Image: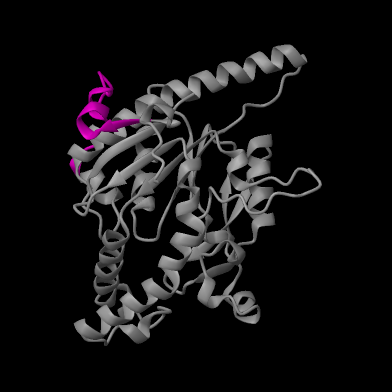
């Protein structure tokens, strides 16, 4: 007999698009349609209505959360009798390949940076913390690029520790999607932001817990708030294939592109190739590593095939 869990026992409050949008109240729209168009990724269909209905409401909620966290930080300082540097508020953005993480992260960055107190908002992706291709090839991990084991987790944890401790500047490696590899000896400097957005496939991953009870930090231990962007498997696959077809006629045509060999494929060949990559790599990573972390997020944004968010689930406090 199937056991059904009562919605009242769920750790989330779930909102329809309309009920979530109503929570925006008087939060002002600070982006133009032209800016929204520039912020969205290649295959996304984000428009200003989506920003108004979904992301402005989220920006309002985050403003309340950030203010509350700052009050808690000051209360702890008074208790400890210390005067530490400000503690950056870190937001994680997780989800599958092709779900629109980059667009969400950039839109959030733009909205948060236009709060009245004009906070410094930085954005990094965990792509820069992938092991270089030479390492992945040596370890037989090129087919598992994007899986948890393909990241230099120690370097990522040290970076986030530096951010939280207010060390300046913290440095994050740069990743090139053109050459599909980490760029040697190039870095992004992150200098004590008020807010840092960290976007990546596996940022909510936990891994195995130690049996001896010793502390092993996870990336999400450094997050103050996290967002998981969700969509059905068949929808994600269609978005991935469409993006691949678009790139075949744009970025892949560059001789420097790692995927230049795909630029001459016919529509049918490109579709078959993208479908194979999706099934063999991205779908496996989604089911084994990414989707199981969904319930760890503070907020889940569920997208439809039209790229619109139809449902928002907010974790109860």
Residue 44 is inside the magenta segment:
no
Along the viewing direction, whichever of 313 and 47 lies nearer the viewer: 313
Q: Which residue is depicted at the point 20% across and 30% down? A: 18
The spot of residue 98 in percent (x, y) is: 34, 60
Is 131 left or right of 124, judged from the image as shown?
Answer: right
The spot of residue 299 in percent (x, y) is: 41, 36
Q: Which residues are magenta?
A: 13-33
Along the viewing direction, whichever of 257 and 98 lies nearer the viewer: 98
> Can residue 140 be seen in the rendering of this structure?
yes
The spot of residue 220 in percent (x, y) is: 58, 43
Is 265 left or right of 256, judged from the image as shown?
Answer: left
Is 50 left or right of 219, judged from the image as shown?
Answer: left
Is 225 left or right of 231, judged from the image as shown?
Answer: right
Residue 28 is inside the magenta segment:
yes
126 shown above or below 82: below
175 shown above or below 262: above
What is the quadrant of residue 314 in the picture? top left
290 shown above or below 132: above
The spot of residue 88 in percent (x, y) is: 57, 32
Q: Which residue is depicted at the point 18% across and 52% down? A: 306
> Can residue 201 be seen in the rendering of this structure?
no
Q: Which residue is depicted at the point 42% across and 45% down? A: 228
What is the quadrant of residue 193 in the picture? top right
């Amino acid at each position: 007999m199937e056991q059904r869990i009562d919605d009242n026992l769920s750790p989330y409050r779930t909102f329809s698009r309309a009920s979530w949008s109503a929570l925006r109240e008087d939060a002002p729209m600070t982006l133009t349609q032209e800016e929204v168009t520039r912020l969205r990724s290649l295959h996304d269909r984000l428009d200003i209505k989506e920003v108004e209905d979904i992301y402005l409401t989220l920006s309002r909620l985050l403003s309340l959360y950030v203010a509350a966290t700052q009050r808690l930080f000051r209360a702890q300082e008074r208790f400890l009798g210390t005067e530490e540097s400000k503690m950056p508020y870190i937001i994680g953005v997780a989800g599958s390949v092709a779900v629109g993480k980059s667009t969400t992260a950039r839109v959030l960055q733009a909205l948060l940076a236009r709060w009245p107190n004009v906070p410094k908002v930085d954005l990094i992706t965990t792509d820069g913390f992938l092991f270089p291709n030479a390492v992945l090839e040596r370890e037989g991990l090129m087919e598992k690029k994007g899986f948890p084991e393909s990241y230099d987790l120690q370097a990522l944890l040290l970076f986030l520790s530096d951010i939280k401790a207010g060390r300046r500047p913290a440095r994050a490696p740069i990743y090139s999607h053109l050459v599909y590899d980490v760029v040697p000896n190039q870095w992004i400097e992150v200098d004590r932001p008020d807010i840092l957005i960290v976007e990546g496939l596996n940022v909510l991953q936990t891994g195995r817990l130690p049996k001896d009870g010793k502390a092993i930090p996870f990336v999400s231990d450094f997050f103050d708030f996290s967002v998981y962007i969700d969509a059905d498997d068949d929808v994600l696959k269609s978005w991935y294939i469409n993006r691949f077809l678009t790139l075949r006629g744009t970025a892949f045509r560059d001789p420097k592109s790692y995927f230049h060999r795909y630029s001459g494929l016919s529509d049918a060949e490109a579709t078959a190739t993208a479908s194979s990559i999706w099934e063999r790599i991205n779908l496996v990573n989604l089911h084994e590593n990414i989707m199981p972390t969904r319930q760890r997020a503070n907020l889940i944004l569920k997208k439809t095939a039209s790229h619109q968010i139809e449902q928002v689930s907010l974790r109860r406090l």
